[in-house]
Image (tube, helix red, strand yellow):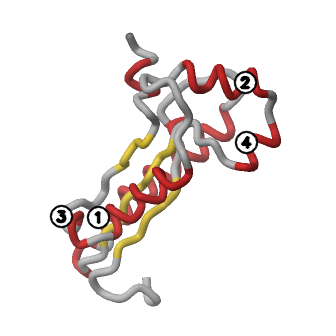
Amino acid sequence: MPYLNEGVSVIINGSTNATASALDSSIYAATKAAIVKIAKVAANELADQKIRVNVVSPGPTLTRGLEGAVPTEALDYLASITAVKRLAEPIEIANAVLFLSSNEAKIITGTELIVDGGLLNYAQK
């Protein structure tokens, strides 16, 4: 990676769909799963340059795009399948990215941080 300086942090946007097995999501899920694997390989390949590579995988997040695309009932359903019974706010996802980018996370590389309100775990109950 000729354009990355030594010691930088690369954060890739994933999705809980890379882990979940939702119906009608095969192409999206496979793409996001590939992104997670690419990030893990890149973390190994860039380790000697002290470049950290991680993935943040959000769950259902209340964005303007989502609000405008689905009915209220769908938003309520998405909230109901999380352990915290609500959708994530975009700032909560941003805070996860900020953490992984910070010096407080300088030991973390090759990791996927799932920020989903407990969705993936709660679905297994």
Of residues 108 and 89, the one drawn nearer to the viewer in this rendering: 89
Q: Amino acid at mark 2?
A: Ala
Q: Amino acid at mark 1?
A: Asn
Q: Position of residue 13 (x, y in %)?
A: 52, 56
Residue at the left extreme, as displayed: 107
> Residue 74 — which label?
2
Quarter holding the C terminus?
top left
Q: Position of residue 43 (x, y in %)?
A: 32, 64
User: Going from the N terminus, do you reach mark 3 or mark 1 first?
Assistant: 1
Mark 1 — residue? Answer: 44
User: Going from the N terminus, do you reach mark 4 or mark 1 first?
Assistant: 1
Residue at the top extreme, as displayed: 125
Q: Amino acid at mark 3?
A: Ile
Judge whether 64 appears above or below 26 on screen. below
> Residue 107 — which label?
3
Secondary-structure class at tag 3: loop
Q: Is residue 53 left or right of residue 85?
A: left
User: Going from the N terminus, do you reach mark 2 or mark 4 first?
Assistant: 4
Mark 3 and mark 1: span between their CA atoms?
13 Å
